[in-house]
Structures are given as C-alpha cells and as structure tokens.
Amino acid sequence: MSDVSPPSGEPAEGLVGVPDAFQRLWTPHRMAYVDGHDKPGDASTGQCPFCRAPQREDADALVVHRGEHAYVVLNLYPYNPGHLLVCPYRHVADLTELTTAERDEVGALSATAMTVLRAVSAPHGFNLGMNQGEAAGAGIAAHLHQHVVPRWGGDANFFPIVAGTKALPQVLGETRDLLAAAWPGATC
C-alpha cells in the first residue's frame, strides 16, 4: 500500500486523479506539436508549415525577414524567447540538397539573426543547429531548417528540468515585431 493518501484519509493506491506531491502546469497548446500537427512527409500534401508561411502576411506567419532563397521565422514552439528558424523557400529535407546560393544565404541569415538578437535581447550565447531526420530529433524532418536559439546564463532553471515546461516572458507577435524592426534594412 502507498504512503500517499488523498485528503479523505483513504489509501491512494489504484485511484485515478489522486493528488500527489506535484503541482502541474498545463500546456495544452503543445499537444498539436506532440500529435504531429503540420508534420508533412512531402510538399505535395500542402501541409508543410515552412512552405505555407512565406505565402502568408509576415506578422501573421511570424516571418521576421525574407531573403532571396531563404527566410527567417519565429519558432511556434520556442526553447527560449527569440528562438528563430532559418528556412529555405524550397522544400528539401537535407543540407546536401541545397544549392550553393541557398546554403550561403541560410548561413548569412543565421549570422544576421545572431546580430539582431544581440541588439534586441542581449543573450549571453546561442545554440545553432539543424536536426537532419526524425532520428536526429527533427520535428519537421521533410523541410530543412536551421535553429538559432538565444541563451542566457541560468535560462535552464528548474522549470524545464523538473516540470518539462518553459516560461516565455513575451508573446510571439511582440517578439517578431521587435526582431523584424531591428533587422538590417527593415522598413517596418
């Protein structure tokens, strides 16, 4: 028998929904991500969010900057405030499938994203990377994207470690507006 008992004094063993020592922070909006919403297999389904985003208004799609071969967009499920994705317009899954011009622009936009994030948010460092394939952790493996994640000392506090939850102090639309306005050559 368990040592944990509900307020009534009855044993907790075998009961569903019995209070325990944990407080829970519910994040139901993440269920769409967990369930695989918008995770395409190929471009023919029209479901790829990285193919659809450039067809929408920048503020609506959270696009921060548009280049010739690639664009920069806020991550809908950010690890930290200002978590950006650099995506080629073309629907390709692997870095080796990019043309030289596409690869050069993804790199240049990633560097500019770091400069803009430093000016807007003063992060202490960055994580940059691409997860190539589902086995490597790619949430949307069918469309290549580079992560640019700003980091601050102490940003990995107890929330993500203990609760599996990240507290973000700014809504995505506000973050997008700040970054878009600070992008070199921005007219907004």
Image: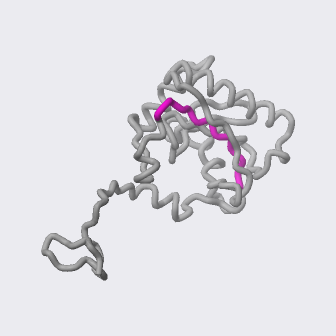
Q: Where is residue 173 in the image (x, y as percent from the top left)?
A: 44, 35
Q: Where is residue 141 in the image (x, y as percent from the top left)?
A: 69, 55
Nearer to us in this view, 117 or 93: 117
Q: Position of residue 180 (x, y in %)?
A: 54, 26
State whether residue 7 is above or below residue 155: below
Q: Name the side, left or right, on which 5 lies relative to 86.
A: left
State whether residue 33 is above or below residue 108: below
Tell me which residue sits at (66%, 48%) in the image.
51
* Quadrant of image for the N terminus: bottom left
Q: Where is residue 125 in the image (x, y as percent from the top left)?
A: 59, 28
State whether residue 118 is above or below residue 5: above
Nearer to us in this view, 165 or 73: 165
Tell me which residue sits at (62%, 26%) in the image.
114
The colour style of the image is: one colour
Tell me which residue sits at (25%, 77%) in the image.
12
Q: In which quarter of the image is residue 16?
A: bottom left
- Could one spot residue 171 in this view of the protein? yes
Q: Name the side, left or right, on which 71 lies relative to 187.
A: right
Residue ranking furthest to the left: 8
Q: What stretch is highlighted in magenta?
A: 142-154
Nearer to us in this view, 60 or 123: 123
**Residue 144 painted magenta:** yes
Tell me which residue sits at (65%, 31%) in the image.
66
Nearer to us in this view, 161 or 39: 161
**Residue 90 painted magenta:** no
Total numbered labels? 0
- Could one spot residue 43 in this view of the protein? no
